[in-house]
Image (tube, helix red, strand yellow):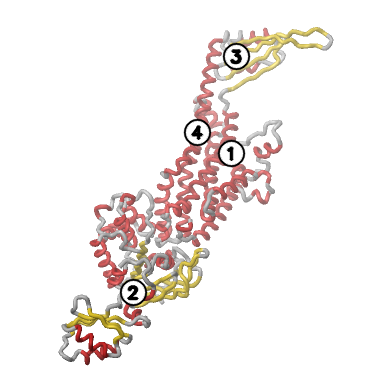
Amino acid sequence: MNRTGWAQIKAVIRLEFKKTLFARRGVWIYALALLPVLLYIAFAFAVGNRQHRSEGFARHGEKRVAYQDLASIQPGMTKDEVISILGKPPVASHWVEERPMVGAPNVRIAHEDYRYSDGRNDLDVGLAGGRVVSLNLTTHANPGQDSVMFAGVFQFFFLRLAVFFGCLGIFMNLFRGEILDRSLHFYFLAPIRRDVLMAGKFLAGLLATCTIFVSSEILQTCAFLWHFTASEQDLYLYHNHGLQYAAIYAGVTVLACIGYGAFFLVAGMLFRNPIFPAAVALIWEAINPFLPNILKQFSIIYYLKSLCPVEIPVAPGTPPFFALLISNAEPISAPWAILGVLVVAVIALYVSSRQVRRLEVNYTTE
Amino acid sequence: MNDRIIFEDVSKFYGEILGINRVNLSIPPGITSLVGPNGSGKTTLMNLMTGLVMPSRGQIHVLGYRTDDPENLFKVVGYSTQFDAFPKGLSGFQFLYSYLLVSGRPSSEAQQLAWQAIERLNMGEAAHRNVASYSKGMRQRIRLAQALAHDPKVLVLDEPLNGLDPLARAEMIALFRSAASQGCYVIISSHILHEVDIISDQVVLLSNGYVVAEGQIQNVRKEIQEHPTQIMIRCNRPRELAAKMFTSEQATEVSIHKDERGLLLKTRDADRFYLALNELAMDGIEIESIAPADDDVLSVYEYLIGNEEVVR
């Protein structure tokens, strides 16, 4: 491409980026992008409340206990052993079980439930007949556990719904929106190659979606880390790959915008009604785990899932259908996954460039 | 071929609806008016000429450029459409400036050309107002400014005088004439026939998607054999001259003008009539003027198309 072509692309990006980013009809895209941020903020508040309560338990306990003390309690210990280590519980309840016996009178078993806390971790101890029968150590702020939750929200909400529909709203409107507004002729009357115009519009859409969704991803990470203490944040970000994960998620978001953007750009030129291609693409992406290997390669989520840094574990007992949806049974290597998204995008952009040359300004038939 | 706008057997169908059919045209420089009732194919012809729609059949070349090559075509073509929509949120200046930037002009040149076009169209005061707040006439002007901004060789103007007040119309007509006198190809569609008559060097008459006549209006008129030519003669003794005319073989119909200072006659052979007139007028009748009365667009239009939706 010559210098004029680049100048034209720059001019189109300038016009389209502003228009796309500040479009009133695109407010719902911002809402979609901000929803996970709000979710993490709400989660941080909930964790904060729980921690506040735990701190109360810790203050009201007979002894000041440490995490190691809580972790030292084992099933089978006697009530006295527990109290000698952790002191009298700040919260306790008891009840009596009447257990029926065959051919014998009912047996009465005394149950007691204790709750201890070191201020950040709670230990629920279940005693029956004076011995520990159940233990539940809850850590409110657990970066490892929470990063799995983050991965779940990222894969199942952010990528599959927010970025997917956001790209639909922005890229399908790049040409279709102007046909509906009857303003497409503005560009078609300029001495600009149609494929150069398409490239400019695509890049403007990409810039807008990346601005919205990468910003959202960064805000999500900040909101996600909010309820951790400074040392926990430091540990997660610099020693447990947190920063690396955040960068990978941002990269996956950019790739998702490229892939879905290219797909919806061509869909906007081929279809008048966005509902049909959106529904087909949504179903196609959803059934991806059930598709034969060759067909999987024509799906964007297949590559994106392979790039996500945190594997979502399948809980035991999950029905095979859902387990298949959650797990990424055949992940491919990162370079191939990146290449895969780019190849899908290039194919879509090639079809777009052919289509845009045939596009006519004929508003009355729209 | 490189100095004309050529349509070779061009047809355009919108599904089953006919836009234009089997059009062959060769448009020279000057002002060419496309005349026809609504739905006759004027806008389709213009959209085809500018590549906004593609022909279903045939080929179009504008000064040698194909219409599916916008990169080169719009370096020489400026099109003021009838589409009354603009990119949102732009002022008049930004609209022109953005258009020129998209055209690949450097920023400083785009600014300069945008201001030149604004001044040419007398829109300086409104240049920084949002286009959405413009009146119909101002929107028409800014569209004309867009078409003119890059100083094109071919100006395609779809109903360019719509919405303009009489003063602005006169200014625009002067502008079109000036462009034509500099060798531009000015293609104008209009259904206001007296304006077309004033400004056109040649006309293309369209009806139901077909070109029914094209060329200089006088030549078109000559070719319409079934309607005798009307001639207006201004003289001092119209009744006497009318009596003599009845004896002539050339006049088929003679009537005295309402003001009694001339007569209107119809002839099937104007050239022979003019020769005969010299003899008939020898007996002291003073002829002030002789002029064809129906070689204007209006008459030709009525003869060929009828009275469909035209404004005189």
Distance from disc 1 to disc 2, alpha carbons, whole Å, reads: 63 Å
N-term mark: 1 or 4: 4
Q: Nearer the viewer, mark 3 or mark 4?
A: 4
Q: Amino acid at mark 4?
A: Val
Cα gap from disc 2 to disc 3, whole angstroms: 96 Å
Question: Residue B108 falls in which quadrant of the image?
Answer: bottom left
State the image quarter where residue B116 is shown: bottom left
Tell whether label 2 touches label 1 (CB within 8 Å).
Answer: no
Callout in the foreground (2, 3): 2
Disc 2 residue crowd, few under 14, some 14–19, many 20+, Cα 10 Å:
many
Which residue in the protein does label 3 denote? Answer: A116
Q: Looking at this view, is A24 or B164 the one in front? A: B164
Q: Which of label 1 and label 2 is nearer to you? A: 2
Residue at image coords 36%, 59%: B105
- Which residue is denoted by mark 4 in the rendering? A37
Number of marks in picture: 4
